[in-house]
Image: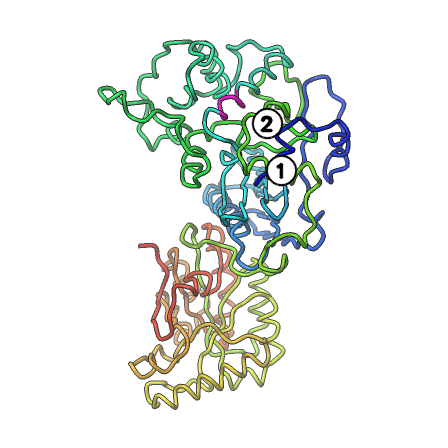
Amino acid sequence: MADTSLRRKLTLSAALGLLLVPGCHTVEQNLPYAETIQFSPDALEGLATRTVSVQADHSTVSYRYPVLGESHPLTTEVRTRMAEHQTAFLEGLPDSGKPELAQDVEILAASEHVLGARITATTSGVRDAGTESSTLWYDTASQEILPWTALFQDEESLEVAHLAVADVLQDGYRISAEQLPGLVGEIAVRAEADPDSVSAAASEPAQDTEDAEGTAEGTEEPEGTEGPDSPAASRAPAAPEEGKDEAAPLVGDADLGDPEQAWEAAERWSASPLADLAFSTAGGLAVRMDPAVVPSAGRISEILLPVEPETAEEVLSELGYQARSAAVTANADPEDFPFDGTLTAEGTTLDCQRLKCVALTFDDGPGEHTEELLDHMAEYEAKGTFYVLGSLVAEFPEIVGRTHAEGHEMGNHTWKHDDLTTLSADGVAKDLERTDKAIEKVTGELPATLRPPYGALNGTVRSATPHPIILWDVDTMDWQSRDTAAVAKHALEETVPGSVVLFHDIHKSSVDAIPDVLDGLHRDGYHFVTVSDIFGLDGMDPGEVHTDARPN
């Protein structure tokens, strides 16, 4: 249950204490201003962050995110959203220049009950450069990732919050109802026309800012409104079609305590400035708004509108109360976080079902060229899978140790590259076990998957291995051609999202092809992941054969 004391007004002493929250600072400003509670994840003792930067000839991309425990849902969602944004940025690069994309995460609230994160993406050197932001909330009780709408009781509460924002703009910024921007303006005008309406403005697609002025009761939906896949339709639910039964469920009845309905409501209300809200040091809400859409805002970088604690009391859900409690009490001790017993484990951090992922795999090593390959991979923060021979692990333990330490995955490729189909079941099992132990001795971990030499398989091999079996869908034939340019060209032309690409790091010509492969695929918006990342080990059984993870 939420802290019931927060259902009442915060005391003055508590509000004053909030000024000590990390990341907050006082600002003297004549216009209404909300002091937000947000801070760097580095401010939480014991919470690790990971920072990545890839500088290519055509662009620079960088990002930082908190590591919340092995494969933690919030880490995975944050990283996946960042990866989606990175892909869109790279796919839209101009023909000249060197644009930049920088993404970061700040913590809005943290406790044993809830954790809130704000993701920002700042671009430069591209059309429509600027900063975009979004917020995510993690409910530890349900282990669900939730949108901002889950902080509110219902859609009527959303309307109340929007009307509070409208009041601040009108009273503090001295703008008329007709000048109120976007969804805030629509809700204010419609609420004035029909005080009994609930979330009336969400029943039609939100208008652009320049169209908001002059909106009035009875305004017709503009001619030529596009279908459900149009940008406008993605911001708010479509208006009822002509001829539809008016007794159909009205917009505004969503149960925001239900994750699915909360996400659906977030889609309908995506044009709302409340999508980027935080809690204020006064115990209310701090709502960000672009100064460009607010007449009289002046030359300021951002508007932070205060929604008073009394209004917040009326509209917050149980999760909202928990989030506010976490924020205003300066957040919890990391020891109270129920995050898999650690805050520093990495694990899988990308959902490759939503991304352009590729698994680069390297067979027959380690060898004298493997460290050069690792250097190339590090320039792109690329993770690969190395199918090593057990006999060579003992010969090159330092290289195997480095490969593992840098986040690459080790796979079993047999002891000395024998054709497993020529062995008995006992012979297969002994060969693989010997190789497994050699890898574990150096890395401390057993290899997750098997790649049989030559891709040779039969029923005996499948029944004798304790590992899933990974083949490939893109064979660069590098062992045969020994042609660096041909190897790179084949990999770039044949790779698709979900591909598993086969190389051999024992050949210098293959290692020399990797910089072009990495640069070309990165430029196309791909993300370089391990075999376990691209397939998901939970979905693979021993002896099961996989060649690629292409979307269906």
SS for callout 1: loop
Q: Pointer 1: what residue?
A: 3
The relative height of residue 197 versus residue 145 in the rendered view (above or below) is above
The relative height of residue 255 versus residue 470 in the rendered view (above or below) is above
Q: Residue at x 47, y 46 (%)?
A: 84
Residue 335 as seen in the image, left or right of residue 154: right
Quarter of the picture holding the N terminus: top right
Q: Where's residue 72, x and y in %?
A: 54, 55
Label 1 Cα crowd, 10 Å radius (few <14 / some 14-19 / many 20+): few
Residue 407 as seen in the image, left or right of residue 84: right
Q: Pointer 2: what residue?
A: 313
Start-end of magenta stretch = 157-162
Q: Which mark is residue 196?
A: none
The relative height of residue 240 versus residue 93 in the rendered view (above or below) is above
The earlier-in-sequence mark between 1 and 2 is 1
Q: Where's residue 126, x and y in %?
A: 53, 36
Q: Residue at x 61, y 69 (%)?
A: 405
